[in-house]
Amino acid sequence: MEQQSKEVKYIDLFCGIGSFHYSFQKLGFKCVMASDIYNPAKENYKLNYGMDVLDDICDVNPSNIENYDILCAGFPCFVAGTKVLTHSGYKNIEDVVLTDTLMTHTGQFQKILNLQHKNYNGSLYNIKAKYHQSFKCTDEHPFYIREKTRKWNNELRKYEYIFKNPEWKKTCKLTKNDYFGMKINENSIIPEFNFDKNTIKLDNPDMWFIMGYFIGNGCCVETEREHSVMKRICLCINEKHVEKILNISENCIPLKFSHCSCKSGKASVYVTYDKVWFNIFKQFGKYAHGKLIPEWVQDAPTKYIQEFINGYRTADGCITKNDCYGFTTASHNLAFGLQRLYLKLGHLFSIRKDIRPKTTVIEGRTVNQRDTYHIRGYVKETKRKHTSFIENGYVWYAPFKIEKADVKNEPVYNFEVENDNSYVIENIIVHNCQSFSQSGHHKGFKDTKDNRGAMFSHVMRFVKTNIPKIVILENVQALLNHDEGKSFTKIKEDLENEGYNVVYQVLKCSDYGIPQMRKRLFIVGFKNVQVNNIDQFFELSEYKKKTTMKDYLGKNFKKEIAYTLRCGGKKSPIDDRHNWDGYWVDDKEYRLTIEDGLKLQGFNDYNLIGKQNEKWKMLGNTIPTIFTEIIGKQIIKHSSIQSDM
């Protein structure tokens, strides 16, 4: 009598749009629970598979789940709106994408290994350091600090204050004696650009003065014509500065501005046309609220930075009677960037944000308005005694306020960053809050206090409670080398300590019939199930298959293998290192469509709904189904999972 196959059941943690479900349902496996925190992904999962998706696994009790055989998991922290320093300026933490690079505590810009986001329940801290506006974070997030201590000097008959060496300290452990660190840019690089074979080196102080004036009172305007695009550089110049600005522009750069008929109060608009300088000025952002200070300005020698600030102050700054320098801007990027520039010059400047109503009435008209940032400070050391200080390439900001409040379902964000695993929020250094990171604590994934440790610790809650026969974990290839291999070793050891036999392998999409460069690490553990030739589990030669974008997508792509699909950063120039969606097809520029993205991730019959940016985010975060299909088939081939009753 033929033995009947047992129904294999599994759970799908961090399910996204359901790569495991897509492949496993074709193998006859049944999903008994799925979880994710991203609502668009949950909606797509239900639409395509007909089952509701639970929220954050931190809030799920494993004891309440139906018995299952396989656990699948592809395994964050600051609140939305927190400003993070990327190589292209300060971004809201929720808007950072994988193609960004983040400045770390060493002053270098490093790649992001993964983006992390969850809904958080627990204590949220409101922190304010001197010279800063307040920000919020979870209690486990480490900061780069120096602790102030005091020691009695018997000769002087008074206490002397001493600062300990820098260390990482979690938010919940911070005191009023912990000073927050920020790395100061110590580079001295004169920028040089090449546009259309025209090379320009910015080695004239007057160039920097005009660039500073531009960021305060200038803009670049592109006007499309029938067969061309007109590119204008515009400066709004106060009547008392006209002679000086025009003289510097024409005689020292040279840029010849012409008066425009448009006037505003005591200022007039002047325009000029120059392709090279248009490309330079364009890097300072668009509109008043979008202005930014490029990193090459931060890298410049201090004498040029001083001229840049002088130009900006002439255009849009002030000096009060008590010699306080002040600036007001609608751009958070400009505010934090200016604070960094002053740090390089050895001055501490503060930032204060004014939250204003969205609209206001001017001369009977209702107009929109934005929040503003006020930057203030002194350049004369004798003006006031600073509680914060600069030393050895870092500034150390005194704490001002540390408050705690409990929250529920608060969206929080975090990153894993290559090498240093740290980043900068609002000009203060922080560390990835996951317990396995390089913070020096190295508590690994066992730090599960109040369900707020690393996500892997919650995976292990399910493993220990439900004891599945097979555990499948998926992550980025970089996990193998993260923290000198300690993170991966900790994962493997935690599974082995629970009695699992563990195998692992990095799989590359283009090796198995989908022409995409994407690589993913798979870790598979077996327990209480018979396994045949476990050392051959990742012997996958029978699945090997080569194909090209032309054959797979049916268009004449010049490139054979697609770049790795990402969550954001679309429409970069094709020759730009950030490009991933642009290709040459029949010698014409072509951008991947959502349908292309679905096919390159192996979803050939999937109904993906949502906004365009949501769709790309879901596609960039998902696992290629060819991987989950192969893993499922190998489980059937090498284990007794379908026959164990």
Image: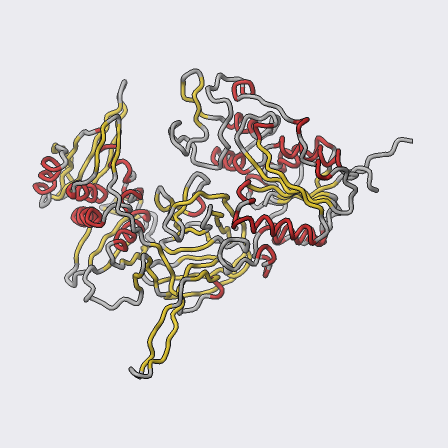
Question: Viewer-proximal residue, 142 or 37?
Answer: 142
Q: Residue at x 67, y 30 (%)?
A: 540
Q: Residue at x 29, y 58 (%)?
A: 350
Indicate the colouring scheme.
secondary structure
Give left or right: position of 529 versus 16.
Answer: right
Quadrant housing residue 475 = top right
| Relative height, residue 244 to residue 180 (above, below) | above
Q: Pinpoint residue 422: horizontal percent, then vertical percent.
A: 44, 52
Residue 367 shows in this picture:
no
Q: Pinpoint residue 152: horizontal percent, then vertical percent.
A: 36, 80
Quadrant housing residue 214 = top left
Residue 441 shows in this picture:
yes
Q: Residue at x 65, y 33 (%)?
A: 22
Give left or right: position of 372 versus 553.
Answer: left
Q: Pinpoint residue 486: horizontal percent, then vertical percent.
A: 56, 51
Q: Quadrant of the C terminus?
A: top right
Question: Viewer-proximal residue, 269 or 351?
Answer: 351
Q: Pinpoint residue 140: horizontal percent, then vertical percent.
A: 51, 59
Q: Quadrant of the N terminus?
A: top right
